[in-house]
Amino acid sequence: MKKLLLATAATALMAGAASAEDVKIGVLLGFTGPLETTVPGMAAGAELAIKEVSDSGKFMGGSTVTAVRGDTTCVDAAAAQSAGERLVTSEKVAGIIGGDCSGVTGAVLQNVARPNGVGMISPSATSPALSSAEDDGLFFRTAPSDARQGEIMADILSDRGVKSVAVTYTNNDYGKGMADAFAAAFAAKGGAVTLSAPHEDGKADYSAEVAALASAGGDVLVVAGYVDQGGKGMIQASVDSGAFSTFYLPDGMYGESLIQAIGAPLNGSYGSVPGTDSPGAAKYLEVAKAGGFDGSTAYSGESYDAAALMLLSMEAAKSTAGKDWTAKVMDVANAPGEKIYPGELGKALELIAAGTDIDYVGATSVEMVGAGESAGNFREYEIKDGKFETAKFR
Amino acid sequence: MDFLNALVAFLNFVFVPGLAYGAQLALGALGVTLIYGILRFSNFAHGDTMAFGTMVTIFVTWFFQSIGLTAGFLPTALLALPFGILATAVMVLATDKVIYQFYRRQKATPTILVIVSMGVMFVMNGLVRLFIGVDDQNFADGGRFLISAGEFKAATGLAEGLSIKGSQAVTVATAALTVALLFWFLQKTRTGKSMRAFADNEDLALLSGINPDRVVQVTWIIAATLATIAGVLYGLDKSFRPFTYFQLLLPIFAAAIVGGLGSPLGAIAGGFIIAFSEVMLTYAWKKVATYVLPDSMAPDSLLQLMGTDYKFAVSFAILILVLLFLPTGLFKGKSY
């Protein structure tokens, strides 16, 4: 017992010192549960970055890094917390990549990370609620909040000089969340939402819904729905009755089938979908392929970025203590500095050691905003002559 | 000018859609009311009979479209309609032979027949989904607009546009023609007269030598015809999806009951009452009011009595009010 205590104390002392050691990083994802098909690609991404850093031999004066896995189950907060507890107390991880689903991520943050002062970077928790959660500065995410597209929509519409819009959303969490986030962001930009009304999917006739929206008025109709569902019906009914002629189409409404169904009246409408023109995305696919897995699965790139950001921040802070490295995440992730793409982590470590500022771009063009979450990348598109055309990337 | 704008906005968003919807409901309610009047039970399978007829019509329409046979400005579905009616008539006659006839011979009470019709409804429901699937099907073609909103604005210089879809015009014209033919048939022909006699007093009709089997068959054929026409018109104007046809059962029964079950005139009136109530109670009147009222009185709110999500609640509420205060409906229907 005495020996164990002594060993623990010694490890605690060593943590934070810049001598060569083995740093453990927790990979806390839902290896079982609803996301079990997605998570292997995510874990592979995170572990690829960890291996890359460890193999470079340039991390914290030659320290090695090992990944320790924990299972969140995605849905069971109690199981996720005990897995997180194990990572922190018995494995002594310096930081946690995860969790994956928003609910368990919040639970681990509040009950494990904050009490123990361990930093977390989640690659896939997208709930807007996490933006305002108490986190003592310990929580970051490389995935954009669901509310983020609402802000992007407000930006695009006000850049185009639109002052008043009507909003219709599909009556579920996705539609309502987006409509609410958009309304708040658009109001902050000085725009007016004349009416924000839900529509039910799967109905035959949307003329009554459109009539109410037409009565409220607005230059553009924002359709936060689904392309093969009520969203299409709303647009069809608007075009038929001449109520609206320009539509704003967020990601759920992006699809060739919409152009086929509506045709010419859709020309001149515009919208946004997640997307990036950064070379990082293609580079990541190569790196992942060389690592023996498919990097195109959902949130795999975000996971790589989360692990890379965490380790680069530790290097920048010259410390693995949660309160030290988390203070550096924003600096490492954002401009100015030399751009770092996937597969260049060794170079990044050298640059940091040499005192050069870096701007981690990674697989998903990470740019941290707000309380430490990815701004996300969106492609603004227009419909011209029956085709989607990229206007610009945001 | 403002008054004209208000009128056009009213026509565009309330009157024209309400008229087309009302015509579709009226045709559906006519079928329900005929079955109720002559066969003496509420046919819950009517919505799915509509779906079946529409499905056959859609298949024939697709075939016609594939061989390049179209009707020009009119939708091809009108050419395919007779085939849909034929198939549906055969189907309901077979159903009657296999199922309803048995219960009729047993002198089953109307309540039992209602439950039997629910069984038939589920079977038809499944059949339609089996053949055409549960998704939206698009079969409308021909001229999309009689007048489009843009053309109307350009022609009149008004701020508001009026659009009349081709399908809306076809709906109203077809419904008017069908109703005229039906009334002529019921009032003037020998078979029609015997049907009415059978409805008024079954025993007397039998004593006077009316063949009951023939009356039943003709009734089913007419009901199938009305159901198919109503279904095809609804599908052309809105969209075809088996589930929405099942849901149509509520407004159709509400229409038939409001008008008075068993009364053809009542079914037509009921269809329009239900349709216009649904549209007018959920319409946001702000636009119209802003045009009509002086600036100082212009409304800030939407002037919407209830959200459009509550459309079906309107049919329900009217149904309950009528049953409470006027159980036999506006046109003195029957109740068995």
Image (tube, coloured by chain):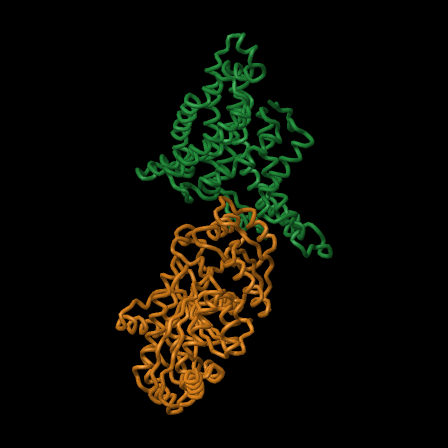
Q: Quadrant of residue B269?
A: top right
Quarter occupied by residue B97: top left
Where is residue A268? Give x, y as percent: 45, 60
Image chain in green: B
Numbered marks: total: 0
Residue at the spot x=40%, y=27% of the render? Answer: B91
Q: Residue furthest front?
A: A1
- Give percent across and percent down for residue B205: 54, 11
Residue A285 or residue B113, whichever sits in front: B113
Compared with residue A361, is residue B151 higher up or lower down, i.e. above or below?
A: above
- Taking depth in this image into account, of A26 and B106 the one nearest to the observer is A26
Q: Is residue B141 visible?
A: no
The chain displayed orange equals A
x, y percentage for residue B29? 54, 30
Residue A92 visible, this orientation: yes
Q: Residue at x 48, y 16 (%)?
A: B105
Q: Is residue A150 above or below residue A354?
A: above
Q: Is residue A129 left or right of residue A280?
A: right
Q: Pinpoint residue B58: horizontal percent, then vertical percent.
A: 39, 37
Outermost residue on the right side: it is: B296
Judging depth in this view, the residue of A102 and A392 nearest the camera is A102
Q: Quadrant of the C terminus of chain B?
A: top right
Specify whether A296 is left or right of A273: left
